[in-house]
Amino acid sequence: MSDVSVTVYTREDCHLCEEAVETIEQVADAEGVTIALDLVDVDEDPGLREEYGERVPYVFVDDSPAFKYHVDERQLREKLQQSA
């Protein structure tokens, strides 16, 4: 079973981003799903900063848009199980 790819577009000092990452890690751990977590700071790339602006965190699961601003634990559990 391969890791489930989870990408979080984030920025420094983003409280919602920190909450999203914590939720993702906790749900994956509780479900026994191994994830490959990639944190991308949108402020390090002008193109990403323009694309996402203040719309962070923006979460992709297996390269598909999954959540914006808040991660819903129940929905994340379903997405991880489907992708695992």
Image: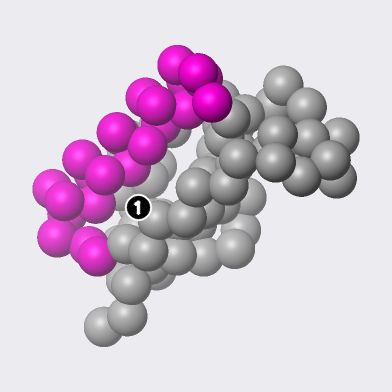
Horizontal side of 61 relative to 20 (left or right) equals right
x%, y% of residue 4?
38, 67
Judging depth in this view, the residue of 43 and 17 nearest the camera is 43
- Kind of residue at badge 1: Glu
Figure quadrant of residue 24: top left
Judging depth in this view, the residue of 78 and 10 nearest the camera is 10
For the record, the magenta segment spans 12-34
Residue 70 visible in the shown view? no
Magenta stretch: helix, strand or loop mostly: helix
Residue located 70% across and 41% down the image = 44
Residue 42 visible in the shown view? yes
Query: What residue is disc 1 on?
Result: 78
Residue 33 versus residue 18 in the image, above or below:
below
Residue 6 versus residue 22 in the image, above or below:
below
Residue 4 versus residue 48 in the image, above or below:
below
Figure quadrant of residue 49: top right
Question: Which quarter of the image is occupied by the N terminus?
Answer: bottom left
Horizontal side of 14 relative to 44 (left or right) equals left
Q: Within 10 Å of the Cα at label 1, are there few (<14), some (14-19), or many (20+) other Cα atoms?
A: few
x%, y% of residue 45?
76, 45
Query: In the structure shown, which secondary structural element does the residue marked by tag 1 occupy?
Result: helix
Magenta-drawn stretch contains 16: yes
Protein image colouring:
one colour
Judging depth in this view, the residue of 24 and 74 nearest the camera is 24
Residue located 37% across and 45% down the image = 76
Which residue in the rendered view is the most extreme toward the bottom?
Answer: 1
x%, y% of residue 37?
40, 56
